[in-house]
Amino acid sequence: MLMGRAGNLNQTVLCYHSGMSAILHVKLPAFIAEINDSGIVLSTLEARMEFVIDLARRNIAGGGGPFGAAVFERDSGRLVAAGVNRVIASRCSSAHAEIMALSLAQQRVGGFDLGAVSQPAHQLVSSSEPCVMCFGAAIWSGVRHLVCGARDEDARAVGFDEGPKPSAWAEELRQRGIQVTLDVLRSQAVAVLKDYTAGGGLVYNARC
Ligand SMILES: [Zn+2]
């Protein structure tokens, strides 16, 4: 059984129940629950990027990683679900912002495929380019458009390893019908990464 929200109203909790015994919880900050219930509509890509960059900044302030992401209905601009990086806080290496946003969005729409014919086209907006894991997750999610702020090289420049993503990763997505838009408010997105590491934020990576 899949559940989108559980526990008290101040916490958004991602749950997976397998029978009665296996449950995975990833707690997101209280502001994510408030945002996801707010009915936000943002009409431009810049506004949507500004929104996820702000999520990243708020997440840092709460002890999280410097990454924010959100799923929008592409054409209406209605927010479906926002997410932030909770790897350290949740002790879960897959708790990247994109995975959080996609997973919550799928629970909120009630299906694993955001590209189903019954669904409006969905768009994933991320403050940074996807790592190799989130690159794969974007393909599997059913989103039709990926929008990124900071580039892979920007994340690497402050010490994050984005993994062995194909060099032609954007073209791989386009060949699967996923539009890709890069460099939206890139300098603002890069500033969040730099501020995080300058402030002593932990940089965690896959093993080499
Ligand atoms: Zn990732």
Image (cartoon, rainbow, N blue to C red):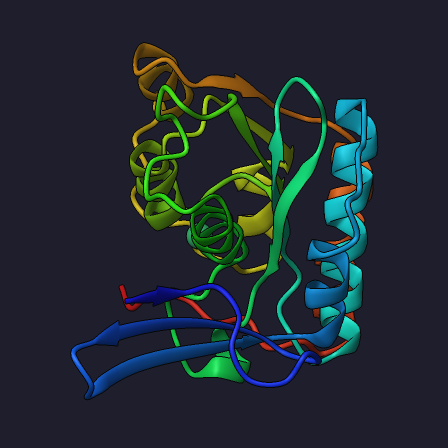
User: Where does residue 28 sit, x and y in percent of width and height?
Assistant: 60, 73
Apparent side of residue 178 relative to residue 188 in the rendered image (left or right) = left
5 over 130 or under it: above or below: below
State the image quarter where residue 183 is shown: top right
**Residue closest to the eye, 121 or 126:** 121
Please name the residue shown 76% across and 57% down the image: 35
State the image quarter where residue 16 is shown: bottom left
117 over 143 or under it: above or below: above
The residue at the far bottom in this view is 21
Q: Quadrant of the N terminus?
A: bottom left
Apparent side of residue 156 relative to residue 103 in the rendered image (left or right) = right
Please name the residue shown 69% across and 66% down the image: 33
Q: How many marks?
A: 0
Apparent side of residue 128 relative to residue 206 in the rendered image (left or right) = right
User: Where does residue 203 sit, x and y in percent of width and height?
Assistant: 55, 71
Please name the residue shown 37% across and 30% down the image: 142
Apparent side of residue 49 relative to residue 16 in the rendered image (left or right) = right
76 over 36 or under it: above or below: above
Please name the residue shown 45% across and 66% down the image: 95
User: Where does residue 9 sit, x and y in percent of width and height?
Assistant: 68, 78
166 over 84 or under it: above or below: above
**Residue closest to the eye, 207 or 41:** 41
User: Where does residue 184 sit, x and y in percent of width and height?
Assistant: 73, 27
State the image quarter where residue 186 is shown: top right
**Residue closest to the eye, 136 or 36:** 36
**Residue closest to the eye, 6 or 127:** 6
Q: Quadrant of the C terminus?
A: bottom left
